[in-house]
Image: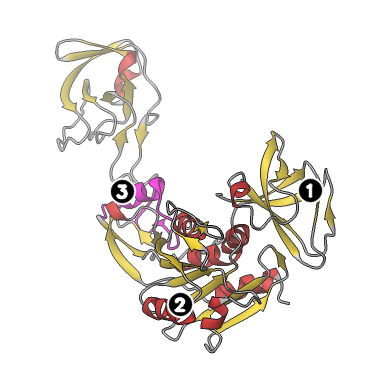
């Protein structure tokens, strides 16, 4: 039986950063930068004012109060280049370039404006309210490093370089295929023995949450030829395929039967609960495929452990781990002998206290899964979790 860590490594080995594309900055949110982005200019590009006020010479504001003649009006964005000489000042707004000759910015609240003049009552030391050219970055500095996930701050930094486009790893397209004769689309009247297909919706949402683009294929019946046809059509057209159901040892395990003769795909038992039956590999066209068990909690936990990290790597991210923290178990629960356990938990106290959402493994309890705010990862060598024990919890999206 393969360990959780070993199977996670095998799943990651199937993934590599996707090809680089150049996109408009408007379309870059949530993508990963492919190259180091350097500045060719100092940032800021020139000395500029940090306050609304007056640009003056320090020598003119030693003896206060004093009246100075106003020789220019400089709003932000002004291209004017006045010179502030002895006995003069320039009215200046925040962000405007500091004019030649000036070395001090006097905030407007320390002045009284006259007609063509300004009375300076108080003044700061020279340079206090001046933003110096290059204090943010100098030419050659890496402003946004390769591998950076583009969010609000990073996109602003790219824009500050004057770039309208950016080279990024493209977003992975991941097909989601649920299997089973018992599954019907949500909203379909149910007859005895039928279930609404929840797994394809669960996994499509999980793909989206991981930063991929899901291609959701509705439930495929337990028909080997039908499934083979679906997988053949997807192979080479998407970046990965995730299936749910049909990987155990039952008489109708269609995924296992459909791929039994494919040398690039292996099926095996993993020492984890839930999610013991697993499969992965590459289809003939090279597309990675991850075959997950069909119980919803098993699918959810298996995706978190094996598929989500692979999607993050395809996106070009180096860190593929969920944030984790130490928490205290509010109640005890049993663990499977010799297998790691992935227990959905929820927060029940302000001091990082968690409680299992269900007794036992409960791999079929899809309604209870909606309560989960994390996955407690219990090592295989732990026989039982007792109330008060510390557990490691992955912060996940249910």
Mark 2 and mark 1 lie on one chain; the one further toward the N terminus is 2
Label 2 crowd (10 A; few <14 / some 14-19 / many >=20): many
Is 218 left or right of 74, judged from the image as shown? right
Label 1 crowd (10 A; few <14 / some 14-19 / many >=20): some
Q: Is residue 365 visible?
A: yes
The quarter of the displayed image where residue 350 is located: top right
Report, in whole angstroms, how far the alpha carbon at label 2 lies from the one at label 1. Answer: 44 Å
Task: Name the secondary structure under disc 2.
Answer: helix
Nearer to us in this view, 34 or 130:
34
Instruction: Please provide the residue range marked out in magenta.
Output: 136-163
Q: Which residue is mark 2?
A: 227
Mark 3 and mark 2 lie on one chain; the one further toward the N terminus is 3
From the top left corner, tell me how far across and down residue 346 is, in percent: 66, 43
Q: Which residue is mark 3?
A: 160
Task: Name the secondary structure under disc 1.
Answer: strand
Report, in whole angstroms, how far the alpha carbon at label 3 lies from the one at label 2. Answer: 50 Å
Give the vertical position of 42 relative to 234 (above or below): above
Report, in whole angstroms, how far the alpha carbon at label 3 lies from the one at label 1. Answer: 46 Å
Nearer to us in this view, 309 or 317:
309
Query: In the image, what residue occupies the spot 73% across and 77% down?
Result: 1
Q: Which residue is mark 1?
A: 390
Can you tell which of label 2 and label 1 is closer to the viewer? 2
Nearer to us in this view, 365 or 328:
365
Give the vertical position of 87 relative to 101 (above or below): above
Query: How many numbered tags mark residues here?
Result: 3
Task: Name the secondary structure under disc 3.
Answer: helix
């Amino acid at each position: 039986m393969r360990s959780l860590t070993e199977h996670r490594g095998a799943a990651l080995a199937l993934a590599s950063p996707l090809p680089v594309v150049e996109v408009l900055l408007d379309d870059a949110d949530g993508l990963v930068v492919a190259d180091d982005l350097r500045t060719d200019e100092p940032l800021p590009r020139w000395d500029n004012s940090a306050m609304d006020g007056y640009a003056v010479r320090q020598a003119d504001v030693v003896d206060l109060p004093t009246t100075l003649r106003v020789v220019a009006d400089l709003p932000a964005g002004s291209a004017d280049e006045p010179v502030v000489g002895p006995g003069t000042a320039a009215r200046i707004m925040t962000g405007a370039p500091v004019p030649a000759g000036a070395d001090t910015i006097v905030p407007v609240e320390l002045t009284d404006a006259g007609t063509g003049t300004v009375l300076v009552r108080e003044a700061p030391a020279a340079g206090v309210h001046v933003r110096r050219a290059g204090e943010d970055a100098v030419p050659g500095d890496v402003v946004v490093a390769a591998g950076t996930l583009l969010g609000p701050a990073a996109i602003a930094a790219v824009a500050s370089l004057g770039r309208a486009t950016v080279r990024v790893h493209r977003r992975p397209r991941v097909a989601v295929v649920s299997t089973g004769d018992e599954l019907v689309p949500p909203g379909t009247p149910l007859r005895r023995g039928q279930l609404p297909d929840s797994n394809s919706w669960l996994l499509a949402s999980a793909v989206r949450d991981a930063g991929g683009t899901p291609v959701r294929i509705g439930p495929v019946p337990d028909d080997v030829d039908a499934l083979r046809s679906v997988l053949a059509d997807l192979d080479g057209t998407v970046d990965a395929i995730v299936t749910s159901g049909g990987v155990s040892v039952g008489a109708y395990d269609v995924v296992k039967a459909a791929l039994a003769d494919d040398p690039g795909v292996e099926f095996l038992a993993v020492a984890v609960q839930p999610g013991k039956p697993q499969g992965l590999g590459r289809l003939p066209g090279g597309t990675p495929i991850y075959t997950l068990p069909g119980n919803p909690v098993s699918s959810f936990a298996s995706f978190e452990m094996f598929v989500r990290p692979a999607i993050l790597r395809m996106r070009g991210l180096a860190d593929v781990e969920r944030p984790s923290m130490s928490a205290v178990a509010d109640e005890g629960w049993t663990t499977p002998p010799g297998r790691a356990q992935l227990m959905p938990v929820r927060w029940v106290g302000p001091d990082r206290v968690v409680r299992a959402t269900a007794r036992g493994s409960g791999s079929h309890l899809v309604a209870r899964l909606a309560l989960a705010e994390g996955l407690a990862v219990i090592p295989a060598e732990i026989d039982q979790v007792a109330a008060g024990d510390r557990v490691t919890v992955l912060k996940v999206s249910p």
